[in-house]
Structure formats: structure tokens, C-alpha cells
Image: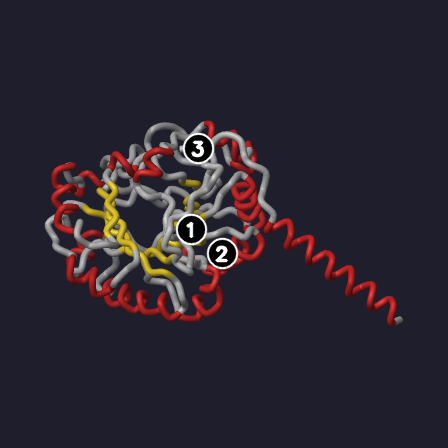
Amino acid sequence: MYLALLSICLAALVTAFLSWRRRRSPAPKPKGKIPISVNYHFTRKCNYSCGFCFHTETTSYIAPLAQAKRGLALLQQAGMKKINFAGGEPFLYPKFLGALARYCKDDLGLESVSVVTNGSKVTQAQLADFGRYIDIMAVSCDSFDEATNVAIGRGTGAHLDRFRVLAALCRTHGIRFKVNTVVNRLNVAEDMTAPIRNVAPFRWKCFQVLLVAGENDSSATKRDATRFAITDAEFQRFCDRHAHLECFVPESNRVMRSSYLILDEYMRFLNKGTGEPTGSILEVGVERALEGVLWDEESFEVRGGVYDWTREGKKEARKDQALDW
């Protein structure tokens, strides 16, 4: 009996070691494009109604958990180091989000897991449950005037209070706090210097409001963002006003449009108004899907697509030797 128990223990140890070794061993160098950082918009559903949203609720589909995990594993095998979960609002499905974040860290060994959220559905209990698997939380805040947020469609009047609570919660749980702002007609003249300094994000992304054909570019689409549009010169003046802030990271339409790899709810890469989605990576594989997406790797590098993206906050940006920029 003793020998039998010993054999079982040894077998379990060997299995655990081989599993760990598979996760930690460097994968073979992928061919072609390397999807080092991917944005997975696993849902289009959202509890806010921002007037300029370019990823609107045109479907209610969410991939089964097993399929989502399989897709993430394929991306990791192709060279992905960072995954960003977005929507819609990902915290409408906290169990699904938590399971994927845990899988990406424990099973795939990804360097970074980040989440983009409007912050309204995040709770202390959720972060206690799976916050340790999240490196970065990017919370959307377009104005420090609550009336402007309401006019945009970002909540009904309590967004800033929740935003500040979430900043503190992230720090309590060791999650790096990031702010995303869409610069548009209603906030382009605002000086956000003082409130941004007060909340002290490690990174403040400011996007020029983007019109995407078929999503938000006319009265025929679910959202019509044309009334929020600003000129390049107006966006530049906003940038000049905030460029002295160390955390400030601006992204114009030119840089933003094709420098992101966006995976939709069907696990297809999107071309953001420049063409049809690719085939699902679950059906055609990552390499073939990447052949059909317009991804400007140079713009990805220029906008600082690789940065200090782990909870530890390494000061030097990560450089992947496989990247051929």
C-alpha cells in the first residue's frame, strides 16, 4: 500500500512538473506577424450609452468559455504577451472575465492581463476573487465635469464618484490604474491637469474620437458620432495643454485606426472600417487571420504599444527579440 501511494504521489509530481515546463518553456518562433498585444472585445453589451462608441451592441453573442480559452491559447502560441479584455462592458460578465484572466495567468503564463471598463460594475468582492490576475485596469473617464459625462452618455450622474473609488480599489489590490479619455466636441476645451494629477494614473490614454464606417458614422448606425467629431488641430491643442503630464499618452485618428489588433466576440480580427472582419481564429488559425487584417506594426511601436505592462511595473519597456520592426 505504501508503494502504491508513493507511486501515485510521484506520478502527480511528474505531471505537475511537465505542465509547468510546457507553460514556461519558450514557444517556437511564430512565422509572419506576431500578435504581441491583442484586444479581445468578448461582448458588445454595455450598460452605458456613450454617443461616440465605435463597438456597439449589434449582437449579444459571447463565445462559450471553452472556445474563448482555446482562442487565447492559439494567440499565446502565436506570440501574444499581453491580452486586453474590453467590450461593451466586460464586468457585466464577471465570472467569465475572472475565469479568462485566471486562465491567461495560470495556464498561459501571459506577461500582462488588462481590462478596459467604465467602472460602474466593478466590486470589491470581484477584485478580491480575481484581481490578482489583472495587471492593469483602464477606467474610462471623458470629463471631470459630471454634466459633460451625462451629455456624452457615460452614466447618469455618479460616474466620477465611482471612478475615484475604483482608483483606490485598484491600488488596494495591486492593480495598476490607467485612465482612458475620448477627446471629443464636448470636452476638447477642458483642462484636466489638476484632476489627473490628483487621481495619479500611471498612464493616461487620450484618444481622438474615431468614426468607424458601419458602427458610428451616420444616422443609420446604432451610434452617430459625427456630432462629437473634432479636427486634428483641435485635438492637437488638447494635447499641447496636457503634454507636460508624464502619464499623458495621446493617440490621434491616424495612429489609432490601424495600430490595434482587435478581436471581436466571434474571435475575428476587425479592420475598423477598412474592410470585412477576418475569419475566426478558431476556424482559420491565427496566422491566416493575421494575413487578412490591416495592422500597422510601425504605428503600434510609435504609439508605445509595448510598455511597462505588468503589476511589478518594470521601468524598462519589454522588447521581444522576435519582433522585427
Q: Who is closer to the viewer here, 233 or 275? A: 233
Q: What residue type is labelled 3?
A: Asp
Mark 3 and mark 1 residues within 8 Å of each other at the beta carbon: no
Q: Position of residue 234 (x, y in %)?
A: 12, 41
Q: Distance between the residues labelled 3 and 1?
A: 26 Å
Residue beneath disc 3: 324
Give the mark nearer the N terminus: 3 vs 1: 1
Q: Secondary structure under badge 1?
A: strand
Residue 231 higher or lower than 133, as above or below:
above
Residue 284 higher or lower than 2, as above or below:
above
Residue beneath disc 2: 101
Mark 1 and mark 2 residues within 8 Å of each other at the beta carbon: yes
Q: How many marks?
A: 3
- Pointer 3 local density, CA inside 10 Å: few below 14, some 14–19, many at least 20: few
Q: Secondary structure under badge 2?
A: helix
Quarter the C terminus occupies: top left
Residue 58 higher or lower than 165, as above or below:
above
